[in-house]
């Protein structure tokens, strides 16, 4: 049973967003900004990875489909709980392949993806600069090779990861305010 929809701080209907894209594209930056501005629940998808996945990535090994399966299941469970509560929510999750996105949307969840697209050169520069994060810059090529950008038949809002995050946030909030 789904609870009555809880409107956001700005009076918006709840949305259930997965902010997606490769490592370093700005998922956490944009998702925390949205959740703060709109009062929606936030979950860092990286925090749902089994420790073995984090260990693998930290040591420069890309994850396999089998590695990602239990993590995607936890991401799905979190999204499902938000939908059932009727409270707007934002999850960060790379969601690199179409089948992963299908797994997140299973059981008819009304998920929308926000795909942040950033050039390989900008991503490489950011990951080289970033400190205190388990994901090494050396995994960027495999992230880019694994990415299947969402198609027009998927529920996706596309934004540029190269604009200032405040600009992207304004664009997204305007999008939600003006939609039918
Ligand atoms: N639009 C932007 N312009 C410039 N720098 C940005 C932008 N968005 C994020 N950054 C910076 O890029 C780095 C990566 O951002 P962030 O951690 O949000 O990405 P992410 O997609 O969540 O990464 P990961 O998946 O590896 O956790 C951070 O140092 C962040 O401050
Ligand atoms: O699917 C994957 O390979 C992983 O989710 C990675 O994308 C990282 O968790 C994330 O980007 C943190 O840097």
Image (tube, rainbow, N blue to C red):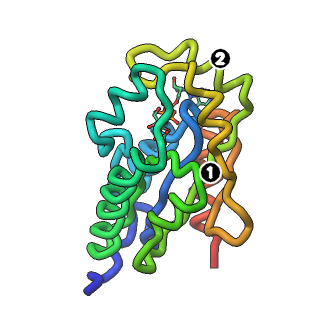
Q: Which residue is mark 1?
A: 115
Q: CA distance from mark 2 to mark 1?
A: 20 Å
Mark earlier in primary sequence (2, 1)? 1
Query: Which type of secondary structure does the marked residue at label 2 adopt?
Result: helix
Residue at disc 2, CB closer than 8 Å to ligand 1: no
Give residue 125's mark: 2
The foreground one among 44 and 136 is: 136
User: Looking at the image, is 95 positioned above or below residue 110?
Assistant: above
Name the residue at 56% across, 19% down: 137
Name the residue at 54% across, 48% down: 20
Q: Position of residue 173 (x, y in %)?
A: 57, 57
Name the residue at 25% across, 86% down: 1
Q: Position of residue 43 (x, y in %)?
A: 34, 49
User: Looking at the image, is 49 positioned above or below residue 162?
Assistant: below
Name the residue at 38% across, 60% down: 89
Image-based side of 143 in relation to 76, left or right: right
User: Looking at the image, is 145 positioned above or below residue 170?
Assistant: above
Q: Quadrant of ligand 1?
A: top right
Is residue 41 visible in this depiction of the protein?
A: yes
Image-based side of 13 in relation to 24, left or right: left
Give residue 10's mark: none
Q: Residues within 10 Å of mark 2 (few under 14, many from 20)?
A: few
Quadrant for the C terminus, please: bottom right
């Amino acid at each position: 049973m789904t609870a009555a929809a809880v409107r956001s701080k700005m009076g918006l209907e709840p949305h259930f967003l997965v902010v997606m894209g490769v490592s370093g594209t700005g998922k956490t930056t944009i998702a925390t900004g949205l959740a703060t501005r709109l009062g929606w629940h936030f979950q860092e998808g990286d925090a749902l990875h089994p420790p073995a996945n984090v260990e693998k990535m930290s040591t420069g090994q890309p994850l396999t489909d089998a590695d990602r399966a239990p993590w995607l299941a936890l991401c799905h469970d979190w999204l499902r709980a938000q939908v059932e509560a009727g409270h707007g929510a934002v999850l960060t999750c790379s969601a690199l392949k179409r089948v992963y996105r299908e797994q997140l949307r299973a059981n008819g969840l009304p998920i929308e993806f926000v795909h942040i697209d950033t050039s390989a050169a900008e991503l490489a520069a950011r990951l080289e600069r970033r400190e205190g994060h388990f994901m090494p810059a050396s995994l960027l090529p495999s992230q880019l090779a694994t990415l299947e950008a969402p198609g027009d038949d998927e529920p996706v809002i596309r934004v540029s990861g190269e604009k200032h995050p405040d600009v992207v946030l304004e664009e997204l909030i305007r999008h939600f305010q003006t939609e039918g």
